[in-house]
Amino acid sequence: MLVLGNFLYALAVVVDYGLTIYLWVVIARAVLSWVSPDPYNPIVRFIHNVTEPVLSRIRRVLPLNLGGIDISPIIVMMAVIFLQKFLVGSLVGLSRTMM
């Protein structure tokens, strides 16, 4: 059981890091929407390609547009924080019971 507990803890850490990185990418996307960056810049294209599938689904489900302000990044950030607290916390708790 010790090995499974350590595996679940390592999985929780990796998921937490992945969610943190994605949170920062969404923040960068929101900041880039305030300026007009070069659309052919590889970094801008990477950020757009990584975030657009999630943001477009949120926009389709919740077509909220508050005076031209897109709130889909805020909803995605809240969902990422929820997953960090719930999913990662649950994996860490489960791993502790197995150790």
Image: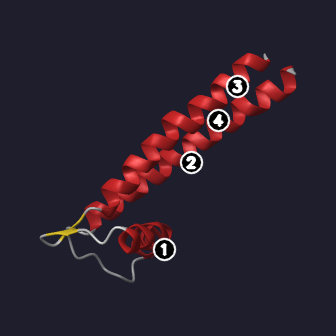
Residue 27: image quadrant is bottom left
Give the residue type at disc 1: Asn
Q: CA distance from mark 1 to mark 4?
A: 26 Å
Q: CA distance from mark 4 to mark 3?
A: 10 Å
Q: Nearer the viewer's eye, disc 1 or disc 4?
A: 4
Q: Mark 1 highlights which residue?
A: 49
Q: CA distance from mark 3 to mark 2?
A: 20 Å
Q: Which mark is residue 12?
A: 4
Residue extending farthest to the bottom is: 40
Disc nearer the start of the sequence (2/4) = 4
> Is 9 situated left or right of 32 in this image?
right
Q: Position of residue 20 (x, y in %)?
A: 48, 44
Quadrant in which the C terminus is drawn:
top right
Q: CA distance from mark 1 to mark 3?
A: 34 Å
Disc nearer the start of the sequence (1/4) = 4
Q: Mark 2 highlights which residue?
A: 18
Q: Would you say the residues marked 2 and 4 are in contact, meaning their CB atoms lie under 8 Å apart?
A: no
| Mark 2 Cα-neighbour bin, 10 Å: few <14, some 14–19, many ≥20 | few
User: Of residues 75 and 5, which is closer to you in this image?
Assistant: 75
Disc nearer the start of the sequence (1/2) = 2
